[in-house]
Image (spheres, rainbow, N blue to C red):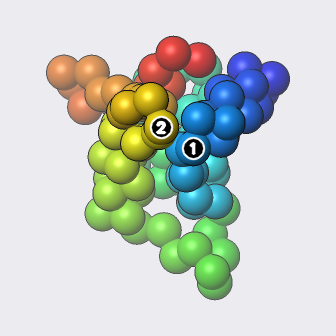
Amino acid sequence: MFALVQLLRNAYRTGAVVSVPQMQILTVLEHTKRPQTVDEILAQLPQCKDTPWDHEGVLKELQALKEVFTKNGKVAFVDVKSDGRWFLSGV
Protein backbone atom coordinates (compact mmCIF):
# COMPACT_ATOMS: atom_id res chain seq x y z
CA MET A 1 0.00 0.00 0.00
CA PHE A 2 2.91 2.33 0.70
CA ALA A 3 3.98 2.17 -2.95
CA LEU A 4 0.52 3.28 -4.05
CA VAL A 5 0.49 6.19 -1.60
CA GLN A 6 3.93 7.25 -2.83
CA LEU A 7 2.80 7.01 -6.45
CA LEU A 8 -0.28 9.17 -5.80
CA ARG A 9 1.71 11.71 -3.81
CA ASN A 10 4.22 12.06 -6.63
CA ALA A 11 1.41 12.32 -9.16
CA TYR A 12 -0.29 15.13 -7.26
CA ARG A 13 2.99 17.00 -7.02
CA THR A 14 3.23 16.98 -10.82
CA GLY A 15 -0.36 18.15 -11.27
CA ALA A 16 -2.06 14.83 -11.97
CA VAL A 17 -5.70 14.52 -10.98
CA VAL A 18 -6.90 11.11 -9.79
CA SER A 19 -10.53 10.79 -8.73
CA VAL A 20 -11.80 8.86 -5.72
CA PRO A 21 -13.26 6.11 -7.95
CA GLN A 22 -9.91 5.81 -9.72
CA MET A 23 -8.15 5.56 -6.35
CA GLN A 24 -10.52 2.73 -5.42
CA ILE A 25 -9.53 0.83 -8.55
CA LEU A 26 -5.84 1.44 -7.91
CA THR A 27 -6.29 0.17 -4.35
CA VAL A 28 -7.89 -3.05 -5.61
CA LEU A 29 -5.01 -3.64 -8.01
CA GLU A 30 -2.43 -2.89 -5.31
CA HIS A 31 -4.18 -5.16 -2.81
CA THR A 32 -4.47 -8.18 -5.12
CA LYS A 33 -0.83 -8.01 -6.27
CA ARG A 34 -1.70 -9.68 -9.58
CA PRO A 35 -3.31 -8.65 -12.88
CA GLN A 36 -7.12 -8.62 -12.80
CA THR A 37 -9.91 -8.69 -15.37
CA VAL A 38 -12.48 -5.90 -15.31
CA ASP A 39 -15.00 -8.29 -13.74
CA GLU A 40 -12.52 -9.34 -11.04
CA ILE A 41 -11.87 -5.69 -10.21
CA LEU A 42 -15.61 -4.98 -10.22
CA ALA A 43 -16.26 -7.80 -7.73
CA GLN A 44 -13.83 -6.22 -5.26
CA LEU A 45 -15.00 -2.61 -5.47
CA PRO A 46 -17.24 -1.24 -2.76
CA GLN A 47 -20.80 -0.85 -4.00
CA CYS A 48 -22.34 2.31 -2.63
CA LYS A 49 -24.93 4.85 -3.62
CA ASP A 50 -22.34 7.48 -4.62
CA THR A 51 -20.36 5.09 -6.83
CA PRO A 52 -22.62 2.53 -8.51
CA TRP A 53 -20.02 0.43 -10.28
CA ASP A 54 -20.67 -1.57 -13.43
CA HIS A 55 -18.42 -3.21 -16.05
CA GLU A 56 -18.45 -0.18 -18.37
CA GLY A 57 -17.73 2.24 -15.53
CA VAL A 58 -14.70 0.27 -14.36
CA LEU A 59 -13.40 -0.03 -17.91
CA LYS A 60 -13.84 3.72 -18.46
CA GLU A 61 -11.83 4.54 -15.33
CA LEU A 62 -9.12 2.03 -16.23
CA GLN A 63 -8.80 3.60 -19.68
CA ALA A 64 -8.48 7.03 -18.07
CA LEU A 65 -5.75 5.71 -15.75
CA LYS A 66 -3.72 4.63 -18.79
CA GLU A 67 -3.17 8.31 -19.67
CA VAL A 68 -3.14 10.69 -16.74
CA PHE A 69 -1.94 14.15 -17.72
CA THR A 70 0.64 15.96 -15.58
CA LYS A 71 2.76 19.08 -15.93
CA ASN A 72 5.49 16.83 -17.32
CA GLY A 73 3.37 14.94 -19.85
CA LYS A 74 1.33 11.75 -19.63
CA VAL A 75 1.72 9.08 -16.95
CA ALA A 76 0.28 5.55 -17.03
CA PHE A 77 -0.95 4.28 -13.67
CA VAL A 78 -2.25 1.03 -15.18
CA ASP A 79 -1.74 -1.08 -18.25
CA VAL A 80 -3.49 -4.08 -19.76
CA LYS A 81 -2.04 -7.41 -20.84
CA SER A 82 -2.98 -9.02 -24.15
CA ASP A 83 -5.38 -11.33 -22.26
CA GLY A 84 -7.36 -8.35 -20.94
CA ARG A 85 -6.03 -8.41 -17.37
CA TRP A 86 -5.13 -5.02 -15.86
CA PHE A 87 -2.17 -4.27 -13.61
CA LEU A 88 -0.47 -1.32 -11.91
CA SER A 89 2.15 0.28 -14.09
CA GLY A 90 5.27 1.48 -12.31
CA VAL A 91 4.17 0.59 -8.77
Q: Is residue 55 left or right of residue 3?
A: left
Q: Earlier in the sequence, mark 2 or mark 1?
A: 1
Residue 31 in sight here? no
Q: Is residue 11 above or below residue 55?
A: above
**Frontmost residue, 32 versus 66:** 66
**Numbered mark located on residue 53 in the image:** none
Q: Is residue 60 above or below residue 90?
A: below
**Dot 2 amino acid type:** Lys
Q: Which residue is farthest bottom? A: 49
**Frontmost residue, 23 versus 32:** 23
Q: Which residue is mark 2?
A: 71
Q: Residue at x 47, y 39 (%)?
A: 70
Q: Quadrant of the N terminus?
A: top right
Contact between labelled residues 1 and 2, with CB atoms less than 8 Å apart: yes
Q: State the image coordinates of residue 16 (x, y, percent, origin top left).
A: 54, 44
Could you tell me which secondary element the residue under label 2 belongs to? Answer: loop
Q: Which residue is mark 1?
A: 15
Dot 1, crowdedness within 10 Å: few (<14), some or many (≥20)?
some
**Frontmost residue, 29 versus 11:** 11
Q: State the image coordinates of residue 3 (x, y, percent, origin top left).
A: 72, 20
The image quarter in which residue 73 lies: top left
Q: Which residue is farthest front? A: 71
Dot 2, crowdedness within 10 Å: few (<14), some or many (≥20)?
few
Q: Quadrant of the C terminus?
A: top right
Q: Residue at x 57, y 44 (%)?
A: 15
Q: State the image coordinates of residue 10 (x, y, percent, origin top left).
A: 67, 29
Q: Is residue 86 left or right of residue 11?
A: left
Q: Is residue 52 above or below residue 78?
A: below
Residue 2 in sight here? yes
Find the distance from the CA under tag 2 to the CA under tag 1.
Answer: 6 Å
